């Protein structure tokens, strides 16, 4: 792999690392240039158009508004499944192979050999 990286592309201990984050002065220059190109009055017009588009049913505009106003929702890791596939029936395996959620398959049909929940 590249200099200072392991076979998985990760930085190795003691390696040179990357170029790092831009200097704060550079960031300030870009922020200043952006603020000059889009002063508050222009930004207000853009926001008004975005809100109008969202109200008219533009899903992408609504997503942008939600992301700015509410933030992006946290991502949840996928549940870790420990399923003994040998206990599943052929129809259950076919449903899973066709893309159905394994939890739904098991919840709707159960696993052969398992006892039913106590409240049934």
Image: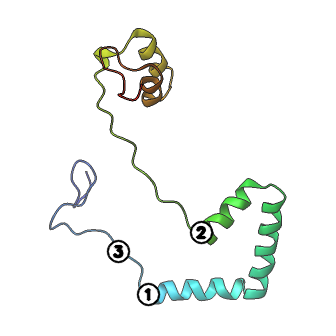
Q: Nearer the viewer, residue 1 or 111?
A: 111
In the rendered image, which quarter contains the C terminus? top left
On the image, which quarter does residue 84 sit in? Answer: top left
The colour style of the image is: rainbow
Residue 1 in the image: state x and y as whole percent: 25, 50
Q: Is residue 18 above or below residue 103?
A: below
Q: In front: mark 2 or mark 1?
A: 2
Residue on which the image places disc 3: 20
Dot 2 lies on which element? Answer: helix
Q: Say which quarter of the image contains residue 89.
A: top left
Q: CA distance from mark 3 to mark 1?
A: 12 Å
Q: Secondary structure at mark 3?
A: loop
Residue at the image point whose x is 78% and y is 82% from the top: 42
Q: Are marks 3 and 1 in contact (CB under 8 Å)?
A: no
Residue 96 percent coordinates (x, y): 45, 22
Q: Which residue is mark 1?
A: 24
Foreground mark, 2 or 3? 2
Instruction: Check if mark 2's residue and mark 1's residue have beta carbons within 8 Å.
Output: no
Numbered label tally: 3
Disc number placed over residue 55 in the picture, else none: none
The mark that comes first in sequence, 2 or 3, is 3
Q: Which residue is at a point 71% across and 84% down the rendered structure image? A: 37
Q: Which residue is mark 2?
A: 70
Closer to the camera in the image, 3 or 79:
79
Disc 2 crowd, CA 10 A, few/some/many (<14, 14-19, 20+): few
The local secondary structure at tag 1 comes to helix
**Position in image of residue 119 (x %, y %):** 40, 29
- Marks 2 and 3, Cα distance to the nearest angstrom? 30 Å
Q: What is the spatial separation of the Cα atoms under label 2 and label 1, in whole angstroms?
A: 27 Å
**Left or right: residue 84 compared with residue 32:** left
Q: Position of residue 112 (x, y in %)?
A: 34, 14
**On screen, residue 90 above or below 70:** above
């Amino acid at each position: 792999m590249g200099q200072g990286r392991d076979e998985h592309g990760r930085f190795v201990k003691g390696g040179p690392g990357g170029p790092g984050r831009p200097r704060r002065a550079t960031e300030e220059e870009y922020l200043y240039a952006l603020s000059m190109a889009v002063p508050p009055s222009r930004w207000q017009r853009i926001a008004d158009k975005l809100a109008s588009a969202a109200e008219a049913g533009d899903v992408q505009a609504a997503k942008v508004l939600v992301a700015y106003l509410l933030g992006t929702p946290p991502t949840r890791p996928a549940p870790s499944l420990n399923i003994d596939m040998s206990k599943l029936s052929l129809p259950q395996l076919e449903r899973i192979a066709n893309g159905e959620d394994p939890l739904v398959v098991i919840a709707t049909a159960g696993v052969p050999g398992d006892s039913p929940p106590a409240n049934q």
